[in-house]
């Protein structure tokens, strides 16, 4: 029987991925207290908080990797490893910031140490009423409460999104096929910032107290999912529709 160890008990992804059959989810604090020999598959969801501020030596990840060699490793990376452009393919990585550079470093460490690995690069992951701290929606809602929403890009800028439910559903399909390598997951289309605001806030947008600030610079970032769709069938339209429905809830 395949048993899965999930590292990231208190993470946003962990709130959904804990439902995987024959799995155990732990906090990063319990890594050294866990017997990795009991598991065939490792899903890494945790990462140190300071990865947003400085380049890491990856001691946290290297410790985990040393405990699970010859096992299947699954890692969720970020669309921020790509430049701001539409239709990014897996071979066009160009990290935008320190966080993304750390993500790429982790990816390379995985590729160096594992044969059976799956890296999924994902865009903005959300649920209408639940999202990770410092996520796109977290920051937007925090500003909304202050009646002042600021963007350093134009309202016509496009961002790719996926709901946490869909990410989980398609991960299960991907893993059943035992896919290996690096794959993008997303809607393949994205939505403009203006459209996201309209769908998400609906009538609240008409509140005269709320001020919106945008810059002139247009910044687009979407993922090409052709490689994944060639393996598991069409998913982009379903993800796109579910994103819109989730924003409108």
Image: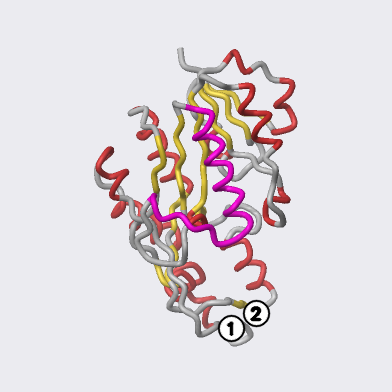
Q: Residue at x 44, y 26 (%)?
A: 116
Q: Residue at x 41, y 67 (%)?
A: 85
Circle number at residue 85: none
Q: Which residues are magenta?
A: 90-114
Q: Compared with residue 206, is residue 84 higher up or lower down, i.e. above or below? A: above
Q: Secondary structure at mark 2?
A: strand
Q: Are marks 1 and 2 in contact (CB under 8 Å)?
A: yes
Q: Residue at x 58, y 77 (%)?
A: 152
**Nearest the eye: 119 or 149:** 119
Q: Is residue 113 magenta?
A: yes
Residue corresponding to mark 2: 148
On the rendered structure, is 9 left or right of 233? right
Q: Compared with residue 145, is residue 187 higher up or lower down, i.e. above or below? A: above
**Nearest the eye: 243 or 113:** 113
**Nearest the eye: 223 or 172:** 223
Residue corresponding to mark 1: 213
Magenta stretch: helix, strand or loop mostly: helix
On the rendered structure, is 224 left or right of 59? left
User: Where does the image place residue 241, in percent across and percent down from the top left?
Assistant: 33, 57
User: Where does the image place residue 19, in percent across and percent down from the top left?
Assistant: 51, 31
Q: Secondary structure at mark 1?
A: strand
């Amino acid at each position: 029987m395949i048993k899965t160890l999930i590292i990231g008990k208190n993470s946003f992804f962990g709130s959904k991925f804990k439902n995987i059959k024959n799995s155990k989810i732990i906090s990063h604090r319990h890594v050294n207290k866990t017997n990795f020999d009991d598991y065939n598959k490792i899903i890494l969801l945790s990462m140190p908080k300071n990865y947003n501020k400085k380049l890491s030596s990856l001691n946290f990840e290297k410790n985990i990797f040393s405990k699970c060699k010859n096992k299947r490793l699954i890692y969720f990376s970020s669309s921020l490893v790509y430049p701001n452009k539409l239709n990014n393919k897996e071979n066009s990585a160009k990290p935008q910031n320190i966080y993304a550079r750390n993500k790429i470093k982790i990816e390379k460490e995985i590729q160096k140490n594992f044969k059976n690995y799956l890296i999924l690069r994902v865009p903005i992951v959300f649920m209408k009423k639940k999202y990770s701290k410092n996520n796109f929606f977290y920051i937007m809602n925090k500003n909304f409460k202050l009646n002042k929403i600021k963007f350093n890009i134009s309202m016509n800028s496009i961002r790719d999104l996926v709901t946490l439910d869909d990410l989980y559903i398609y991960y299960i399909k991907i893993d059943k096929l035992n896919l290996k390598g690096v794959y993008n997951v997303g809607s393949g289309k994205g939505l403009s910032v203006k459209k996201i605001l309209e769908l998400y806030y609906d009538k609240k947008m008409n509140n005269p107290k709320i001020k919106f600030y945008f810059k002139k610079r247009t910044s687009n970032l979407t993922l090409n999912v052709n490689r994944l769709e060639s393996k598991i069938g069409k998913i982009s339209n379903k993800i796109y529709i579910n994103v819109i429905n989730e924003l409108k809830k």
